[in-house]
Image (cartoon, rainbow, N blue to C red):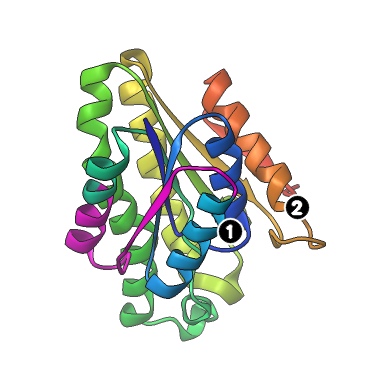
């Protein structure tokens, strides 16, 4: 069985990979930069974990689905999907300056990407009657900020999608959860990556509730 981390990077993605990998799950990494993914996969392998990667632009739904599918073929069925790509700064314009084109990118990133990733793994999960899908976003999902309009809009859509999934599949063995985190996730920053990874592991194991808020009033 495996975990696929969409939006894998050196902070939260790496911490989640190590936390779930230590529990025996093979680790699949997805992001756009193949060179960085290769380096992270090499570090995980050197630590004794089973890891592989597939580069894809999250805004390209077909490429994202293909990347996840290839990792499932290589590493085994996806037991956990962690969807936590870091939005681009270009998605964070003030609301009065935000145009249709400015919203399109965030929606592709947070909503269409989330749907593409989920639809790739949800069928096998439902057939097995087991699996976890974890959506992790910034605090704008709860408290939208008018100076960062794109993510406020797109995170809201992502959470609505996640909540509907949770309600639909909870009785069929698949747990869907959303974690909203206010502040930066990095060593020495607002939230330590390892602490967030521990929380996500608990959400996977305990399988209770839909939404968790960290650093949000």
Q: Residue furthest top?
A: 171
Q: Which mark is residue 25?
A: none
Task: Pick the quarter of the image with the N terminus.
Answer: top left
Residue occupying the point 31% across, 81% down: 101
Q: Position of residue 87 (x, y in %)?
A: 49, 68
Q: Which residue does the image show at 61% across and 66% down from the upper left?
A: 145
> In the picture provided, is 184 more to the left or to the right than 172?
right
Residue 205 magenta-highlighted:
no
Q: Which residues are magenta?
A: 47-68
Element under disc 2: loop
Image vertical order of residue 174 relative to residue 74, above or below: above
**Circle 2 residue:** 192
Among the 4 quarters of the image, the one containing residue 202: top right
Marks 1/2 in contact by CB < 8 Å: the verdict is no
- Residues at marks 1 and 2, CA–CA distance in whole angstroms: 19 Å
| Above or below, comparing residue 78 to residue 86 in the picture | above
Q: Position of residue 163 (x, y in %)?
A: 41, 35
Q: Which of the 4 image quarters holds residue 73?
A: top left
Which residue is at the front of the view, 86 or 112?
Answer: 86
Q: Dot 1 corresponds to which residue?
A: 140
Give the crowd class for mark 1: few <14, some 14-19, many >=20 residues within 10 Å. many
Query: Which residue shows up at 38% across the image and 80% down it?
Result: 102
The front one of 138 and 156 is: 138
């Amino acid at each position: 069985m495996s975990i696929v981390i969409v939006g894998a990077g050196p902070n939260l993605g790496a911490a989640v990979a190590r936390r779930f990998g230590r529990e025996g799950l093979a680790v699949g990494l997805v992001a756009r930069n193949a060179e960085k993914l290769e380096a992270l996969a090499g570090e995980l392998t050197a630590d004794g974990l089973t890891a592989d990667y597939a580069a894809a632009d999250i805004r390209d739904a077909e490429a994202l689905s293909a990347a996840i599918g290839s990792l499932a073929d290589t590493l085994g069925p996806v037991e956990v999907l962690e969807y936590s790509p870091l939005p681009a700064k270009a998605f964070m314009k003030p609301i009065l300056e935000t145009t249709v084109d400015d919203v399109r990118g965030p929606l592709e990133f947070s909503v269409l990407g989330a749907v593409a990733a989920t639809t790739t793994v949800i069928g096998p999960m439902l057939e097995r009657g087991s699996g976890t899908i974890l959506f992790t976003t910034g605090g704008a999902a709860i408290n939208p900020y008018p100076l960062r309009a794109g993510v406020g809009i797109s995170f809201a859509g992502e959470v609505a999608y996640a909540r509907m999934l949770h309600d639909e599949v909870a009785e069929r063995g698949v747990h869907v959860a959303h974690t909203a985190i206010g502040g930066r996730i990095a060593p020495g920053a607002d939230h330590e990556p390892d602490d967030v990874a521990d929380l996500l592991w608990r959400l996977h194991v305990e399988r209770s509730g839909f939404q968790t808020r960290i650093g949000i009033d």
